[in-house]
Amino acid sequence: MPLRVVLLGPPASGKGTQGRLLAERRGLPYLSTGRQLRQEVESGTEIGRRAESFLRAGEYVPDDLALDLAARWMKQAGHGWVLDGFPRTVPQARELDAWLGPWASELVAVSLEADSRELERRVAERLECPDCGWSGRRGKVAGERCPRCASALAVRDDDELENFLSRLRAFGELTQPVAAYYQGMGRLRLVNGEGSRNEVCARVQEAVGKD
Ligand code: AMP
C-alpha cells in the first residue's frame, strides 16, 4: 500500500525537515506548498503574483490557489507522497479526500506538536537554503552554507516576528480544525516535535508505520 502522509503543524514545528527526511527514507515524492509558493513569487509567475501579498502579510493564500498548486503537483506525483503544508484548511482537506476517493481512508495525518515559545525561538534562529529548502539553525552550520548543496543559507522573508505571529494565528483558526477533521476519522497521529532531528524522525516513522 503506498504511503500517503500529510504533515500538519504550526510554523517552525519542523514540517519541512521531517517531511523531507520521511520522503527520502521511504523513497517518496515530497511537496511543500509553502516553499513552492515562495519559488513562484521569486520567479514572478501568475501564481506567485497572486500569492505574494498573502505571504507578505503572514496570511494563508486562498483555497483555490492552494488547491490549484497541489492538484498540478499530484497529477505527476504517483500514488504515494508526503505533503507538507497541504491541506491547511478544512475545505482543502475535503477536496484532497475527494481526489483520493476510496483511498482517502489510507491517508495518515501527522501533527507535529511543539510549545509556542519553542516555535518562536526556532523562527528567530532559522536559516533556509533558497535552492534546496534545507533548513537549520543560525550558528550551527559551518560557514552558514547548506550542508546538502553548499548554497548560502538565508533568513526566510516571512520569518520576522509579526509575520510569524500572524501565521501562528492562522494555524490556530484554520489548520487546527483540519487536525480535528482527521481525528474524527481516526487518521490523526500526534507526534512530539521537540528534540533532535533524528529523535523526531524516529517518532514520525513510528507514527506512519514501518515499511
Ligand atoms: P510554510 O512554508 O509551510 O510555512 O508556508 C508558508 C506560507 O505559504 C504560509 O504561511 C501560507 O501563507 C502559504 N501556504 C502554504 N501552503 C498553504 C496552503 N495549503 N493553503 C494556504 N496557504 C498556504
Image (spheres, rainbow, N blue to C red):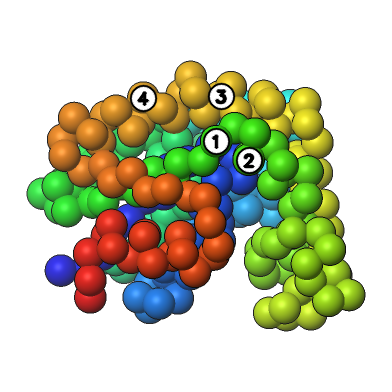
Cβ(mark 4) to ligand 1 < 8 Å?
Answer: no
Q: Amino acid at mark 2?
A: Glu
Q: Which residue is mark 2?
A: 118
Cβ(mark 1) to ligand 1 < 8 Å?
Answer: no
Cβ(mark 3) to ligand 1 < 8 Å?
Answer: yes
Give the label, 1 or 4, closer to the camera.
Answer: 1
Q: Is residue 50 at all visible to an observer of this figure?
A: no
Q: Is residue 48 above or below residue 1?
A: above
Q: Is residue 28 at all visible to an observer of this figure?
A: yes
- Distance, label 2 to label 3, CA atoms, is 18 Å
- Distance, label 1 to label 3, CA atoms, is 16 Å
Asked if the residues shown at circle 1 and circle 4 are in contact, with their CB atoms under 8 angstroms apart, the answer is no
Q: Which residue is mark 4?
A: 177
Q: In what element is the residue under mark 2?
A: helix
- The residue nearer to you, when weighing 166 against 196, is 196
Q: Which mark is residue 153?
A: none
Asked if the residues shown at circle 4 and circle 2 are in contact, with their CB atoms under 8 angstroms apart, the answer is no
Position in image of residue 170 (x %, y %):
56, 24
First reached walking from the N terminus: tag 2 or tag 3? 2
Q: In what element is the residue under mark 3?
A: helix
Q: Is residue 134 above or below residue 122?
A: below
Figure quadrant, ligand 1: top right
Asked if the residues shown at circle 2 and circle 3 are in contact, with their CB atoms under 8 angstroms apart, the answer is no
Q: Which residue is mark 1?
A: 115
Position in image of residue 54 (x %, y %):
68, 29
Asked if the residues shown at circle 2 and circle 1 are in contact, with their CB atoms under 8 angstroms apart, the answer is yes
Q: Which residue is mark 3?
A: 170
